[in-house]
Image: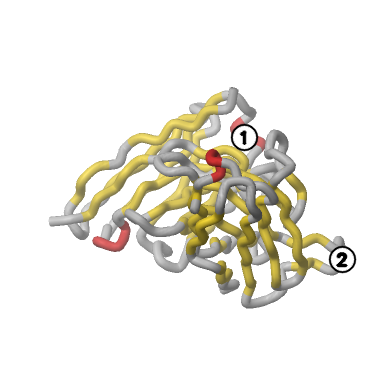
Amino acid sequence: EVQLLESGGGLVQPGGSLRLSCVVSGFRFRSYAMSWVRQAPGKGLEWVSGITGSGGGTYYADSVQGRFTISRDNSKNTLYLQMDSLRAEDTAVYFCAKDFADPTSVAFFDYWGQGTLVTVSS
Amino acid sequence: DIVLTQSPDSLAVSLGERATINCKSSQSVLYSPNSKNYLTWYQQKPGQPPKLLFYWASTRESGVPDRFVASGSGTDFTLTITSLQAEDVAVYYCQQYFSTPLLTFGGGTKVEIK
């Protein structure tokens, strides 16, 4: 059974940092690209960042470019999102998501975690 | 960036009736060399993560009931629930992957029971 479990969310002040983790099981982690997708309270979905299966390719939405860093540890079956210089508009539930098929690019997602809430407020 | 515009924002349909959701792309997501449309549909129920319904615009994901039908090509796409059931109450999103790695979602359409 495929499982994705996010952690690391919480309350942080504007300008602060937070690191999210997503531990996965039930599939060969290194064979799939992964992404982070967020959802602000009561709003729609926004793709944030993606990473290839090897970790050699990383991609970011313009809204987080230069502030967020995605990474993965294939030996630990874990995906990360380092979030720096956080803003109020980064407040959202952050989902990790498994790409459907291709390890070399991000496309669409067949499995999602339950999400972790990040709140940026003073 | 490719912008996806969904309509309507919400709709209320009687049980057993048809619900139709539209997704319009600001540019074509049809890749001519393979004739595939790089578009997916997701269903998100309250308090849950999204669930994949369709990819390549009309390929149904395993386990998705056949009352869900997706169609369209180029810039105009449709998700139809042919006979609405109570468990179909959710928000539905389209998403394009034509401009990978920059992925975008539509704004969502909320489906309720009338």
Secondary structure, mark 2, is: loop
- Does B32 sit above or below residue B13? below
- Disc 1 marks a residue whose amino acid type is Arg
Q: Where is residue A11 in the image (x, y as percent from the top left)?
A: 20, 46
Q: Which of B16 and B49 is in front in this view?
A: B16
Residue, disc 2: B33
Residue A109 x/y as whole percent = 60, 45
- In the displayed structure, B26 sits above or below B95; it is below
Q: In which quarter of the image is residue B26?
A: bottom right
Q: Which residue is drawn at 63% across and 71% down?
A: B24
The amino acid marked with disc number 2 is Pro
Residue at point 47% right, 44% down?
Answer: A71
On whether disc 1 and disc 2 are found on a single subunit, the reply is no
Residue furthest to the left in view is A122
Q: Nearer the viewer, residue A26 or A114?
A: A114
Decide if residue A64 is on the left or right side of residue A108: left
> Which residue: 71% across, 60% down?
B38
Q: Which chain carries label 2?
A: B
User: Which label number is shown at residue A30?
Assistant: 1
